[in-house]
Image: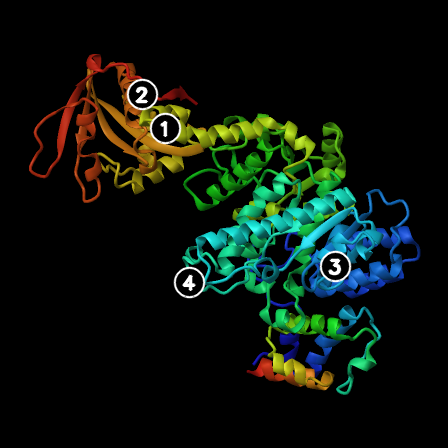
Amino acid sequence: MNEAAIYGVLTELFHDVFADDSIVLRPETSAPDVEGWDSFTNLNLIVAVEGRFGIRMQTTEIEQLQNVGDLVATIARKLRA
Amino acid sequence: MPDSVTLAAFVAEPPRAHPGLADDLDLYWLPPVERWAERIREVEAAPDAGAAWSAMVALANTRLDFVRTLRLDRALQRRFGETPPPGLATRPVRLAVLASSTAGQLLPATRVAALRRGLWVSAYEAPYGQYLSELLDTGSGLYAFEPNTVLFAMDAHHLTRGADPAADAEQGDSVLAETLGELARCWRIAREAFRGQVIQQSVLPIFPALLGENEHRLPGSPAALAARLNAALRGAAANAGVDLLAVDVKAAQTGIARWHDPVLWHRAKQEISPLATPLYGELFARLAAAQQGRTSKCLVLDLDNTLWGGVIGDDGLDGIVIGQGSALGEAFLGFQAYARALAKRGVILAVCSKNDEANALAAFRHHPDMVLRENDIACFVANWNDKAANVRAIAARLNIGLDALVFVDDNPFERNLIRQELPMVAVPEVPEDPALFAAAISDGGYFEGLAVTEEDRERTGQYRANLQRETLQAQSTDLESYLRGLQMELVWRRFDLVGLQRIVQLINKTNQFNLTTQRYTQDEVLAVMDDPRAFGLQLRLLDRFGDNGIIGIVIGRRTEPEQVLIDTWLMSCRVLGRRVEEATLALVAAEARRLGAARLIGEYRPTAKNGMVRDHYRRLGFDMGAAAADGSASGVLVLADLPEPDLPMVIREG
């Protein structure tokens, strides 16, 4: 699965988790850029990502995520594994 | 490597377990949502409150995962805030969640599951870790909220905090008693203060084992304490008038690892994963809806390929697949038995079928394998009108609301028609395999009942029957009284076309209780039916616990003017020890007399597998000759010498 496809699936997830269809994801997008992206919704987001992509993320991996680019790279790496 | 488009589609709709399999956290009995992105936008933009509410109810009645549930809940909150929609037909639920750890993730799905039933929920979550002080302080936020429903959702760590692996049995017992005492105190305070429904969440079995499979032998094990608490909660909650939200049972069914993620527990003190919240919300909303009497009352059943396999109008009475002997026939039988069990506890059954009424009724009246009979069906509609009209007619005739109906049909066309024409009717998305029908109805929770309501108390009949069954075995001091208590009925028929396939199958696969192991083809069985000097008997055994199906086959032939040879006698081993052999002999004797015989000849032909019936005829009073070198033997019974047996069963033709 290439990065563009991951961005596509992820964008749908962001639209539902934050109830906002206007969200456009870029590699540098991070929590302050999205209304409602707090520690609670972040947890939902991670669970949703794990469920939708069928992957499992380690606690340390989650803690190192800085932005959407990091998240996409982690997903891509997990899907290749 | 598949191309990215294929893989993207695959990932966007993640692979699902077989729908209906119990390891699935999905609300699989609800239809999948179509055009999600478009529909949620329509809901968010709906012009007036009434239209928005209806559209949200409709969307809540589709199969939403937790992410979509979150979004629908957000739309609900944005539109209505804390104010119920105008003209709401139900009593608003003011829900206080008293939890010992993070419970906020439970609320969106709880509101959406209530929405699915037309219920409005305002929720209050007590501040983290303060449920007890909130409960004890009449000036707290809890009291200011004025709940009419209180949900105690304590996590397993909290409820088992008294567990000490070094404890002995006595200490283990006292920890259990203390914990139950604390809960009972909470229930009492909540009940007296708020006068509403009190719900206790059972304990999630999340603990790793310390001892292993025999964990219960370690009195201080958290896992063992959780199990004992769950067992004790049933009775304690029922006595206190508290309803149980049985997460332990649902998690056991759908996979505890999917309900509880230790990573989320350590990160955020979420005991229940967001993934499981749609199911959690369902469990809560069923209790809240049942409290308001909003639970389904009537199961409306299609016939062809729903209650039996095949089409009775085309295949005929002896062509439909139902009953013992084929996996498919037994699957339909299982579903019929489930429907009948529901009927026994008060669910009304109706039939809605596209058939000629006479054809449809014939199965209920004449097919020997049917569990459901005509008098089990409160309203029987079989005609060629469209099903929406017929479902309306059923509701009118039974004088119940359309929203009290659950419509079960294997045909997706009919299901979609009913959903479209009568959206208030519940239409479960039953799996294709009839073996999964009963589970789908059960998992859908349509008939949720609260055992301790005034109405149920009046329904004493069912409780009395249960008590009788439990005491039967305890009271039986000997085999004879136990057998009499079983209320057995041995139902006999001569060979016929309806039973033909089962007869041929039994003759060719029974090895143990089989005197001669004489095999027959279908044509040979048909020849027995046509032979005036022969008889074939098929025997069915019923008892108070159910129908055992066809359990015995006997073929006899008049070989001399006054003599009948028992050519074949076989039985199913599961009815051994019930004196069915003697009853069968009485039937064989009657048939032999009908053919003018004065004596019976019984033969035993040994095989590698039928040693258990070596003395069969001797036990029944036959005068056996000496056995041949190969072990075979035959004997004579003079019919005039056969005593009238006193048997613990009724014998009848049917």
The chain carrying label 4 is: B
| Same chain for the residues under marks 3 and 4 in the image | yes
Q: Earlier in the sequence, mark 1 or mark 4?
A: 4
Hey, what amino acid is under mark 4?
A: Leu
Q: Is residue B34 above or below residue B405?
A: below
The residue at which mark 4 appears reads as B211
Looking at the picture, do discs 3 and 2 lie on one chain?
yes
Q: Secondary structure at mark 2?
A: helix
Count neighbours of disc 1 (C-alpha within 10 A) and say few if under 14, some if 14 to 19, many if 20 or more: many
Question: Which image quadrant is residue B2 in?
Answer: bottom right
Which residue is tagged 1? B539
Return the residue at label 3. B107
* Chain ID at mark 2: B
**The disc labelled 3 sits on which kind of residue?**
Leu
Coordinates of residue B512 in the picture (x, y in percent): 25, 40
Estimate the spatial distance between the alpha carbons at disc 1 and disc 3, rounded to whole Å: 57 Å
Instruction: Give the residue number, with chain letter if any, for mark 2.
Output: B587
Cα distance between the residues tagged 4 and 2: 58 Å
Of the pair B600 and B266, the residue shown nearer to us:
B266
Q: Chain of mark 1?
A: B
Q: What is the three-letter code of the residue carrying label 2?
A: Leu
Determine whether B327 is above or below B566 in the image: below
Q: Nearer the viewer, mark 3 or mark 4?
A: 4
**Which of pointers 4 and 2 lies earlier in the amino acid sequence?**
4
- Please tell me whether mark 1 or mark 3 is closer to you in this view: 3
Instruction: State left or right for residue B81 relative to residue B553.
Output: right
**Pointers 1 and 3 within a single chain:** yes
Quarter of image, res B194: top right
Q: Nearer the viewer, residue B279 or B342?
A: B279
Q: Amino acid at mark 1?
A: Leu
